[in-house]
Image (spheres, helix red, strand yellow):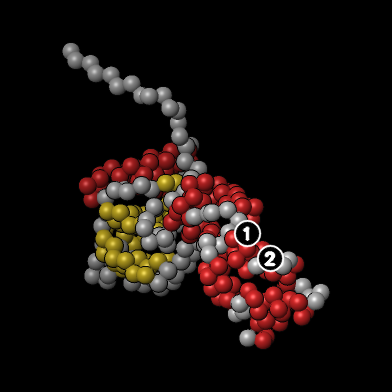
Amino acid sequence: MGNVRYWLPGKGRGEIPAKLIYVSSSIYEGDWSSMRHSHNFAELFYVRSGRGNFIVENEIYPVKQDDLVIVNPNVEHTELSVSSDPLEYVVLGVEGMSFDFGDQSGSRNHEIINYRNQRDELFFYFNAMLRETENKEDNYEDICQNLLEVVVTILMRNSGHPILVVATQRVNKVCSRIKRYIDSNYSEEISLDYLAEKAHFSKYYLVHTFAKYYGMSPINYLIEVRLRASKELLETTDLSISQIAESTGFSSQSYFSQSFRRSCDLTPRDYRLLAKKSGSMTSGEMFNNSEKKS
């Protein structure tokens, strides 16, 4: 008699920061008008059979059997089928998390992975969740939640490149913390790599999520804060242009002047002259006047 025992390392149960909110099954048969939409939760589409296209924010991606499509929250998307080979898929709606795909483009908000080699495994979990929600037997919600954790863990392990799961609430807090750090330390040398290290995100994911909450990338926000500070110094001090550039964190006087002119269509020197002429006029009023002048 043979006996083999494998001990687990005892790290404890690592629950994902998410809740499964629905499971659905669809067959695209041409009688359904597909429209782009978005929502505040992630979706995972597993293609059981068929062929078609997935549209994510104006980009078209072909999909086929055993493709898994992951779409982050607040991303416009829809799916289109090939009439001769209609798409059939299972969809999971997952609240409270988003995915960091660690891509090199800086804008990745979705992922498509083919699981043909793990079809039996993934197909089983998706079908099991669908069956549990259809039958609604005792504790089916707990079973589905546990199966979701298994699926997400498989994604993180088998995607071919790092995929991180990030709690949506944590994303809010991290972006807010990065913003506060920039507000307090704008005069220091700050790079996107450094901010990503502080956030414990990939720099590409940080760019996307920060822009979603604040309307611009962290570096563009940093430049905006530096420009606001430089305007105040131009209005209230006699520091030279090069001194102001240095004290507000710009790498050179020429870069400061280029950024300043791009922002308000005036050179720093012209802005200072306008400030002196305006006397007690506020920075905002001067900026409005400068826009009218331009």
Query: Can you tell which of label 1 and label 2 is closer to the viewer?
Result: 2
Check whether the beta carbons of the residues at disc 1 and disc 2 lie within 8 A of each other.
yes
Q: Residue at x 36, y 24 (%)?
A: 8
Left or right: 197 with respect to 223? left
Left or right: 234 with respect to 29? right
Q: Residue at x 40, y 72 (%)?
A: 58
Left or right: 54 with respect to 202? left
Point out the image quarter for the C terminus: bottom right
Residue beneath label 2, please? 239
292 relative to 17, above or below: below
Find residue 155 and report its horizontal and vertical position in percent. 35, 46
Name the amino acid, label 2. Answer: Leu
Task: Give whichever of 91, 72 is nearer the camera.
Answer: 72
Question: Which element is circle 1 on?
Answer: helix
Residue 214's image quarter?
bottom right
Residue beneath label 1, please? 247
Report crowding for label 2: few under 14, some 14 to 19, many 20 or more residues within 10 A (C-alpha): few
Find residue 212 and report its horizontal and vertical position in percent. 54, 61
Name the amino acid, label 1. Answer: Ser
Question: Which element is circle 2 on?
Answer: loop
Point out the image quarter for the N terminus: top left
Task: Give whichever of 95, 160 is nearer the camera.
Answer: 160
Q: Residue at x 19, y 15 (%)?
A: 2
Task: Give whichever of 2, 163 is nearer the camera.
Answer: 163
